[in-house]
Image (cartoon, rainbow, N blue to C red):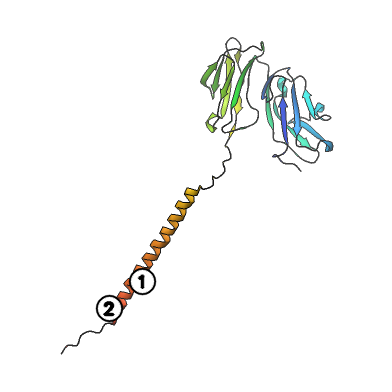
Amino acid sequence: MGSDADVRIVMQTSVSSHPDMLFEYESVSFTCRGFNLSAGWSVRNIKEVIPTCLTSVTCTLNYAFVSDSGEYWCEGAGGERSSTVNITVTGGSVILESPVLPVMEGEAVTLRCRNRATSSNLTADFYKDGLFIGSSSTGNMTIASVSKFDGGLYTCSISGAGESPASRLTVRAAHREACPLSDHSHVLVLGRTVLTVVMVALLLLLLGLLHCGKLGGTHKKKPSTY
């Protein structure tokens, strides 16, 4: 049986390879990767199995409706299930495209503001958690190296066209491997260890000498008094 680590669902539209939002009546394609395709698989949402996604490696929802918004995932005949992806289908005039899957800290992320009425680049204003964060004359905003603080809800607006629905950007912490000690560090650690051992040995020797001195003093004969 597969696991979330090796089975996944991939979505694509005609204008974006990683959509999380699209206009009503646009098409979206689903691909299930990591499954045993010969054993059978399907794409489904919380309401139903997508009928067109039962016979081919990649299937397409030709005309998406607002009611098609929600979570989608792949299921294999052997019980495999991918992680979910969430799409929002809007009947409005503006959408914000952002990564549909979580991104790792340090990656570059581009947010794209689109207007249904034109494919030309238009000046767009961008907001994070309701706060204005900048404008772009190309309709695109790139975060060169995302951090966990960049995670949140993003929207964009285009003058005369309106504002997009909110799109969530999720940022995951990067896996950091422990750095091996350098030669210099090894020498320092070894030196500290030797110094500690020497100090303990000297302390024990001093305590031993003091103890022997006390014993020697108690065994001395007192001088006779006449």
Q: Which element is circle 2 on?
A: helix
Q: Which mark is on residue 208?
A: 1
**Quarter occupied by residue 157:** top right
Q: Residues within 10 Å of mark 2 (few under 14, many from 20)?
A: few
Front one among 92 and 224: 224
Q: Residues within 10 Å of mark 1 (few under 14, many from 20)?
A: few
Q: Residue furthest top?
A: 160
| Residue type, numbered disc 2 | Gly
**Quarter occupied by residue 223:** bottom left
Of pointers 1 and 2, the one earlier in the residue sequence: 1
Q: Please, is residue 1 above or below residue 33 in the view?
A: below
Q: Which mark is on residue 217?
A: 2
Quadrant, the C terminus: bottom left
Q: Which element is circle 1 on?
A: helix
**Quarter occupied by residue 29:** top right
Q: Which mark is on residue 168?
A: none
Q: How far is disc 1 from disc 2 in space, using C-alphas?
A: 14 Å
Q: Position of residue 4 (x, y in %)?
A: 70, 39
Q: Please, is residue 140 above or below residue 217 in the view?
A: above
